[in-house]
Amino acid sequence: MGTSTEAPLFPLDTVLFPGGPLPLRIFETRYIDMVRRCLREQRGFGVLWIRSGKEAGEVVQTASIGTSARIVDFYQLPDGLLGLTCLGERKFRLLRRWQASDGLNIGEIEWLPPEVAVPVPESLHHLAELLRAVLPQLGVLYESVERHFDDASWVSARLAEILPIELVEKQACLELDDGVQRLVRLAPLIRRE
């Protein structure tokens, strides 16, 4: 922490967690160009939840904590658009944001320390087992995601991204830096049966 870097930003109406999948359909020129640069330079881009504004329009306000994404595959979709499969990597804090001449959002970001892997507490072990049962049912999106059912950070991040909760709640979960705290926050939302 303490050092900052510049990164292209992709504000979205979603919250990306480290280790989580992110499928994208790209149609705006500014993002097609961003993808080309990211692939050429072998670098990722920052994903931030849009608090107000639109993905395909003017972004007025974003969350200040986001996650970098790495492109793992690209392909042409049936409608001719560019499809991407990305994977969340590392959390960051947005220090400032501006637009380049082509409309691409650029940010000065500060990397946040990775969460420490800690075991899922026995009292919350049912959440890991629930996730173990649910992930195979989510299809292709989660097929290539590494599994760490014994890590509270990993389990809580996967639950936060798949649960049908408000984006503001997902963002609050992302901003927690402790997987056990995140599990405790999510536990009341899941019936234990």
Image (spheres, rainbow, N blue to C red):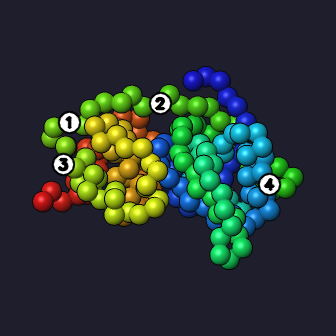
Q: Which mark is residue 114?
A: 2
Q: Which kind of residue does numbered mark 3 sit on?
A: His
Q: Of the two numbered discs 3 and 2 on the same chain, state the one appearing first in sequence.
A: 2
Q: Of the two numbered discs 3 and 4 on the same chain, state the one appearing first in sequence.
A: 4
Q: Which residue is mark 1?
A: 121
SS for dot 2: loop
Residue 22: % across, % down:
54, 55
Q: Of the two numbered discs 4 and 2 on the same chain, state the one appearing first in sequence.
A: 4
* 81 w.r.t. 96: above or below: below
**Residue at the spot 41% in from the left edge and 35% down from the top edge:** 177
User: Alpha-carbon neighbours of circle 1 within 10 Å: few (<14), some, or many (≥20)?
Assistant: some
Q: Nearer the viewer, residue 33 or 123?
A: 33
Q: Which residue is mark 4?
A: 33
Q: Which mark is residue 71?
A: none
Residue 130: % across, % down:
23, 54
Q: Which mark is residue 126?
A: 3
User: Alpha-carbon distance for marks 1 and 4?
Assistant: 45 Å
